Amino acid sequence: MDITQHPRWERQQELEREMRGIGFSRVESGTRKATASGSFDASPAGSRLVSWIIEPLSKMVAEFCDDVNSGKPGRRRTAGVYLSRIHPDAAAYLIAKVVINTKASAETHTAVMIGRAIEEECRFQFYHSANPALYDTIMRDHKKRRMSTGKSVSVMKGQMNKAGVEWPAWPEKHCMQIGMQGIEWLLALDVNGAGPLIQREEQVRASSSRRRTWRPGFRLTLTAAVEELIGELNDKCAVLTPGYLPCVVPPKPWTRPTGGGYYSDMLLPVNLVKTGDDKHQHLLNTVTMPDVYEAVNIVQATAWKINTRVLDVMREAWEGGMAIGTLPRFENDEIPPKPPTPPPCKYGEPGYKEWQATPDGKRWRAWRRMAAAVHEQNIKNKSRRLQAAQALHIADMYQHEAEIYFPHNLDFRSRLYCLPSLLTPQGPDYARGLLTFAHGEPLTDNEAVNWLAIHGANCYGIDKVSYEERIGWVREHKARILNAAVHPFDDLWWTEAENPWQFLAFCFEWLGYMTEGRTYRSSLPVSLDGTCNGLQHFSAMLRDPIGGKAVNLRPVDRPADIYQTVADQVRQYLTVDDAMPSTHELADQWIQFGVTRKLTKRPVMILPYGGTQYACRKYVEEFVREQITEKHKPNPFGDDIMPAVIYLTKLIWQAIEQTAVAATRAMRWLRAVSSMLVKAGHAVEWITPAGFPARQAYVDMEGYRVRLMVGDKKVYKWLRRPTTTLDADQQVNGLPPNFVHSLDASALMASAIASHRRGVRSFAMVHDSYGTLAAHTRVLDYTLRRAFADMYLRHDVLADMAFYAQTTLGSEVRLPQLPPKGDLDIEEVMASRFFFA
């Protein structure tokens, strides 16, 4: 069918024009806010202007200082003496920053501000050289406390003064002389062919004398050419960052690395792969990858619609301020009250460190941690509220559309992502609850009905039992499920579900089935989720029978739960430690508190994706604070929970490594290979089982020409650009998670293609969660297992990676030996009911 003949083609054209308009509005709003806050230099256009100015202005500063320091007399000598104390790049940056942010200001005022800004930079460089230990300590503390720049500057001055590091303030007239010299340079400097940045405009202003006489003055304004240049930069930025929306016609199919998804010439062509790596883009243009194109086109051709019944309930809950599931609260959490005994002195003063070791000091430190956590959570909630409001707005926009579509593209590992944001099948629970497939199929047999019931139990959180028990749970709770569909606000039982909005959508669907029977055309996405999918791939590639059993690669009567397995192992460690004097107190505290699968879940999940003990500690701390503050669980740890958190983190990490031995070996090998490649100056390249050429090339960013030490911030902004040198740490630590992500992407693509060839047309694919209609779930359930097993029967992925690395490094280089394989039969996956469940 000619897409231009589609009945909604005109509407699609309107939407794509609107997407471009969203980009313009976003840039305009950001520029307006930046200007109002005096930080126009932080806007995209302001940032580009500063980057154009710094290099030529820096040369002017350097030449001026050389001339002054040569001994030649002149009126400019004062400015030269001061400017010689700072690197020319830093001086150029500060001059440009102040002038751009104070446009249309009086010239003398701007000149003084330039001088003061340069003085502040010199002051902090002086502090750093005079007492580097104290400076670094203060900076670490300010960063930890997320102190604002203004407050950080003030505190730094006070602390340094108390330490005897005093800075004699520069006279204001000298600051003005410095600034006036900078202004003279900018009046003569050409900005990217647009002429000078600023111009002088004469103005009449009142004098400060009592006679109220009037005298002429000047103010500085951006030139008309520069204002026009800013407009062009904003327009370009808007075109590059449109606000992508769902389509109302099938997305444009991908046939090459550029130009799929959307149709309009008003939008710049979209790249199939989101990468700024030119070498990767060139590589994509030189290979054929039919399976990749086919899989992306299959997934993005799925027709969706808004679940208006869920939308009605969600709108009422939103307007009523009800925080249900991932729908955020309107109110911020309250900062806990300060301890009754405040510090006797300020941070860094004599006696403060000793006071911290006292009971009052420990309570104060614990309060600061809790307050910081609450503050951080409130910031996140603010962002989530905005995202939820925007998602509801998009749902309102599309609620009357019979079909909507989500164009997709890939990341550099070939993982699929929706181009639109906020309301997508890959979003949080409330976003998924708002979407359903546009075309349903009758529940013609018991198997389809059972899959729908299993999905409902999964959404509620009943997913660690057999399928029969899940189906039985739904039938046992039939009355409450139907009541939730008919009167959602009478009994809020459904809001206690693990995914309440998806569960509510199921309640509506179950009501339809109970009302119409087998003729009911169910359109709800029924999802099958992998069990810690990253560990499933590591266990499969090394044929690990222990890890494979823990993540359901082997058939069992009840689903294996690796999170519970790790929790059980940690409890065994605690039992042993409880009998030892050195660890009895901490072990006993955790035995009282309880170690559950919810506590160990996130630490286990992050292991195959490059997780560290530090990240594990963070998740343990977050879980404990949430249980104590929000769930009001008794606190056996006292005011300071960190010793207990650090202790348990080590036990959890030990239990994870004992359970996932093969995964840790594979990750260690991948890191070693990546290290060898980066030392030889090579990026990591490999071909995924789907035929996608993946390329990991994290490069060092060129050190900014300007490196300031103002407050708690260093400026790495204006001339930031990639170098030809690879970032060794990112290359080494990034390969294990990126490699396994490329494998789960290949499995998803193979599953989508195989299912499509068996007649499936509706797909809800989210990396390690595959969904389709209840009537087609049996097909997807089979094909995803077959695709996974075939992938590891046909590909030795670690040996393939070794081949790519050996080819890159040359035959004379000896790679580390591949990790040994176990005796897991990968065909057992076909009999494992809970592999994806």
Image (cartoon, rainbow, N blue to C red):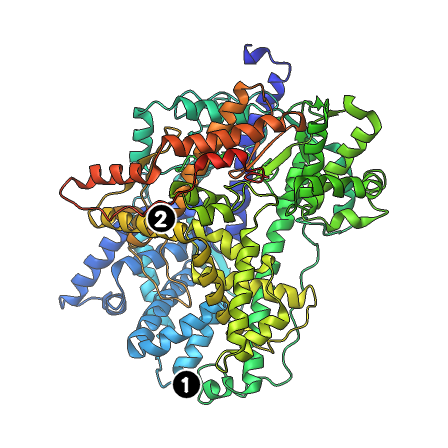
Task: Give the left or right position of residue 824, taking residue 560 as reference.
Answer: left
- Residue 620 seen in this snapshot: yes
Which amino acid does the dot numbered 1 rest on? Lys
Callout 1 crowding tier (Cα within 10 Å): few <14, some 14–19, many ≥20:
few
Which amino acid does the dot numbered 2 rest on? Ala
In the image, residue 435 sits, relative to residue 298, either above or below, namely: below
- Residue 259 seen in this snapshot: no
Q: Nearer the viewer, residue 706 or 617?
A: 617
Q: Are marks 1 and 2 in contact (CB under 8 Å)?
A: no
The image quarter containing residue 21 is top right
Q: Nearer the viewer, residue 364 or 568?
A: 568
Q: Nearer the viewer, residue 363 or 24?
A: 363
Please identify, in this view, whether the residue under mark 1 or under mark 2 is nearer the observer: 2
Residue occupying the point 59% across, 76% down = 637
Question: Which quadrant is home to the C terminus?
Answer: top right
Residue 314, position in %: x, y? 74, 42
Question: Which quadrant is home to the N terminus?
Answer: top right
- Residue 442: image tag: none
Q: Secondary structure at mark 2?
A: helix
Which residue carries the number 2 mark? 666
Residue 700, position in %: x, y? 29, 50
In the image, residue 140 sits, relative to residue 404, either above or below, namely: below
Which residue carries the number 1 mark? 162
Q: Nearer the viewer, residue 340 or 580?
A: 580
Residue occupying the point 50% across, 23% down = 754
Callout 2 crowding tier (Cα within 10 Å): few <14, some 14–19, many ≥20:
many
